[in-house]
Image (cartoon, grey):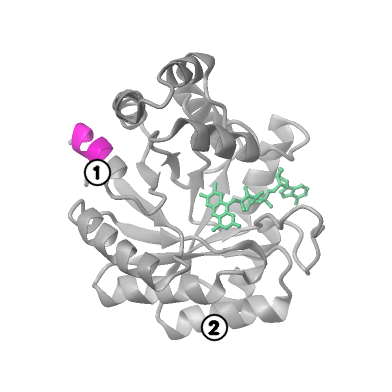
Amino acid sequence: MNQHNFSIEFFPPKTAEGVEKLRVTRTKLAELQPKYFSVTFGAGGTTQQGTLDTVVDIRREGFEAAPHLSCVGGSRESIRQILQQYQAHDIRRLVALRGDLPSGYGMGGEFRYANELVEFIRAETGDWFHIEVAAYPEMHPQARSPQDDLQNFVRKVKAGANSAITQYFYNADAYFRFVEEARKLGVDVPVLAGIMPITNSSQLQRFSEMCGAEIPRWIRLKLNSYGDDSASIKAFGLDVVSSMCERLLAGGAPGLHFYSLNQAAPTTAIWKNLI
Ligand SMILES: Cc1cc2nc3c(=O)[nH]c(=O)nc-3n(C[C@H](O)[C@H](O)[C@H](O)COP(=O)(O)OP(=O)(O)OC[C@H]3O[C@@H](n4cnc5c(N)ncnc54)[C@H](O)[C@@H]3O)c2cc1C
């Protein structure tokens, strides 16, 4: 696995207890030797300090860390200040996103789309950052069509992204087709597959509705059939997701990015099935 580009995502904890728990989680996940840990950023800057604090903690422990940065609701000046803060901490990698404000907030801010953020980061900081952007093999839920979404992804890469991470999916063919079509349009950066371990059926179904990730019918029916039997859900989820990861890597995916939800066990179990 370590010959692949393998990264793990956290969200910034909100409480002192959460910070401590994440430290323990991180120590366990660090044994897998990921290339870096990334830390999400609440749209509108809601977790700005928490994101930075978590990234600084990770780097203090000797690991590479990449903050996410979402631009929705932000001004050029506010984003400039965040970039300067990241540079002052010698952070060299970030995940650049548009983000989503809660409904009712509109879009606001001086950036409409992630390609504008990528352009701005390059204009302000040159080649300082390795920039990752998001990709949607099953289409972003607000896109007009898959073709339109793909064009928008290409625009984002051409604005200066170095690599991409996909939204999670449970259909490897959607990923392979997306990458193939992006290549035909001149995208030559690595597109890492975003992996969401399956551990909780209702939470997964809720998340997936919001972000437009499809849970194939057969997986949904199986999960529903287990009811509250969380051991069976976890065992089935581990099996399904590990097989998909094997297929992705065998089929040429350059690496995997795990949405850990700040838990060590699910990512570790999948990873162990892959080595
Ligand atoms: C790997 C990953 C990490 C994430 N981390 C975070 C996080 O830390 N914080 C957070 O708030 N959210 C995060 N998200 C969620 C993300 O912010 C949402 O999916 C958001 O709705 C879209 O962000 P984006 O950067 O993909 O947007 P964009 O690339 O801007 O795309 C958004 C929509 O607009 C369309 N579009 C794009 N560019 C144009 C254009 N120039 N003209 C017209 N239409 C266009 C696209 O087709 C798409 O439908 C993450 C998602 C992924 C996959």
SS of the residue under disc 1: helix
- Residue 128 is left or right of residue 255, and the answer is right
Determine if the C-beta at disc 1 is less than 8 A from ligand 1: no
Q: Quadrant of the N terminus?
A: top left
Q: Is residue 82 above or below residue 160?
A: below
67 lies left or right of 265: right
Determine crowd level at label 2: few under 14, some 14-19, many 20+ residues with C-alpha closer than 10 A. Answer: some
Residue pictured at 52% horizontal, 19% vertical: 216
Disc 1 from disc 2: Cα separation: 34 Å
Residue type at the position of mark 2: Gln
User: What is the crowding at mark 1: few (fewer than 14 residues within 10 Å), some, or many (at least 20)?
Assistant: some
Question: Which is nearer the N-term, disc 1 or disc 2?
Answer: 2
Pair 1/2: label in front? 1
Question: What kind of secondary structure does the magenta stretch mostly adopt?
Answer: helix
Give the magenta-colored segment's residue range. 268-274
Residue, disc 1? 268
Q: Does residue 128 show up?
A: no
Residue 204 falls left or right of residue 233: right
Q: Please tell me in which quadrant of the rendered image residue 211 appears.
A: top right
Q: Kindly identify the residue that appears in the image at 40 percent across and 19 percent down.
A: 226
Q: Which residue is mark 2?
A: 84
